[in-house]
Amino acid sequence: MSKQVVIVGGGVIGLLTAYNLAAEVDQVVVCDQGEVGRESSWAGGGIVSPLYPWRYSPAVTALAHWSQDFYPQLGERLSASTGIDPEVHTTGLYWLDLDDEAEALAWAAREQRPLAGVDLSAVYDAVPVLGQGYRHAIHMAGVANVRNPRLVKSLKAALLALPNVTLREHCRIDGFALDGGRVTGVRTEQGLLAADDVVLSAGAWSGDLLQTLGLNLPVEPVKGQMILFKCAADFLPSMVLAKGRYAIPRRDGHILVGSTLEHAGYDKTPTDEALASLKASALELLPALADAEVVGHWAGLRPGSPEGIPYIGAVPGHDGLWLNCGHYRNGLVLAPASCQLFSDLLLGRTPIIDPAPYAPQGRLG
């Protein structure tokens, strides 16, 4: 059994990994180069589903299904223990005018997911503020969204209450400590942090860190920009998605509209071009937003990976080093299953799902 685990990266994946491991190991230390949870985890929309779940591989689908079923109890558990409600808000989701609607419905039948075609008149009855001109729609009733900043705050509060967990914010990792072929800790600006096991969950920065060992992890930053409106609490009863853009209602009336996909390195500067594009998409979806205040516009960096399949498991040839990273657009979606699977592997338990598709073995350069 591992005595001390160091987790590099304090996003939702790193925090939830720590949360799962805390009861099983002696000591958990989470290091983040900034404040925990302030990168991709803070910036995303929090839909508890891939945007187009039928377009993903079975590997992503398996993690998504497990997580979707688990999220409500995770939200309740964190809310009860910390007093901070992550707001797992089940609103359902309408997809409008899809080109691959037939494939979506076939996927739903095969996977036994509650996705079905609906008449447009029923959509406009359910979502009166929806823009005109849409031709067809499909709907999944059980889809929720989680208020990701509150999820981060709740996880942080839960970890701070645990005596064997330490959060080290503003703690930049320069590389790994080695003893022969084994990783024995991490090198930080404040000195060496020894560990029995090191977990790399550093989001878009994971590839750069693994490069210090001469390993090529194909995870790169992919910029996404979003805007936030403030409306009445009952303005939008359901999530809606069309032409690659979505609107997400929070319980208090905030409406998130996103997002862009940009390859711009580590630049997180919000741009006027993206703001104009997102506003145009927002007004096409929900014309009444023309009268709503834009209260936020920001950018984040997703950890882009091939096919969006995360890396979960031990790094071959480097005993003591593990990966739980590369979730691309679905870190919040896949977090509960990814972190449970990871804990199962580290602790030698029977894994919740087949771990083979996520294994770093054979996927690193």
Image (cartoon, rainbow, N blue to C red):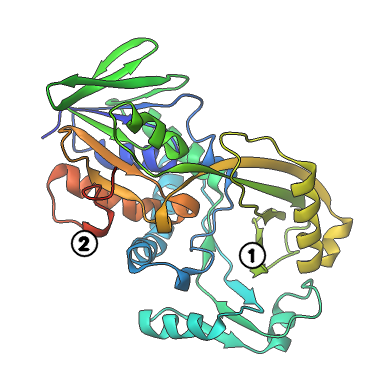
Give the percent coordinates (x, y) of residue 27: 23, 26
Q: Are marks 2 and 1 in contact (CB under 8 Å)?
A: no
Query: In the figure, 127 relative to 60: above or below?
Result: below
The amino acid type, in three-letter code, at marker 2 is Asp
Q: Position of residue 87 (x, y in %)?
A: 54, 52
Could you tell whether 9 is left or right of 3 in the image? right
Image quadrant holding the N terminus, namely top left
Seen as rendered, the residue at the extreme top is 190
Q: Residue at x 80, y 47 (%)?
A: 294
Among numbered discs 2 and 1, the one appearing first in the sequence:
1
Mark 2 or mark 1, which is nearer to you? 1
Element under label 1? loop
Of residues 344 and 100, the one drawn nearer to the viewer in this rendering? 100
Give the residue displayed 52% in from the left and 47% down from the top.
85
Q: Which residue is mark 1?
A: 244
Q: Quadrant of residue 271?
A: top right
Question: Dividing the picture into quarters, in which one does residue 29 lie?
Answer: top left
Q: Position of residue 316 (x, y in %)?
A: 17, 40
Callout 1: 10 Å neighbours few (<14), some, many (20+)?
some
How far apart marks 2 and 1 lie (CA) works out to 31 Å
Residue, x 84% and y 54% (percent of image)? Answer: 292
User: From the viewer's perspective, is residue 9 above or below residue 56?
Assistant: above
Amino acid type, callout 1: Gly
Res 189 → quadrant: top left
Where does the C terminus fall, quadrant-wise?
top left
Does residue 159 appear in the picture of this structure?
A: yes
Relative to 331, 20 lies left or right: left
What is the number of the mark on residue 354? Answer: 2
List x then y, in percent, for residue 291.
89, 57
Q: Total label count?
A: 2
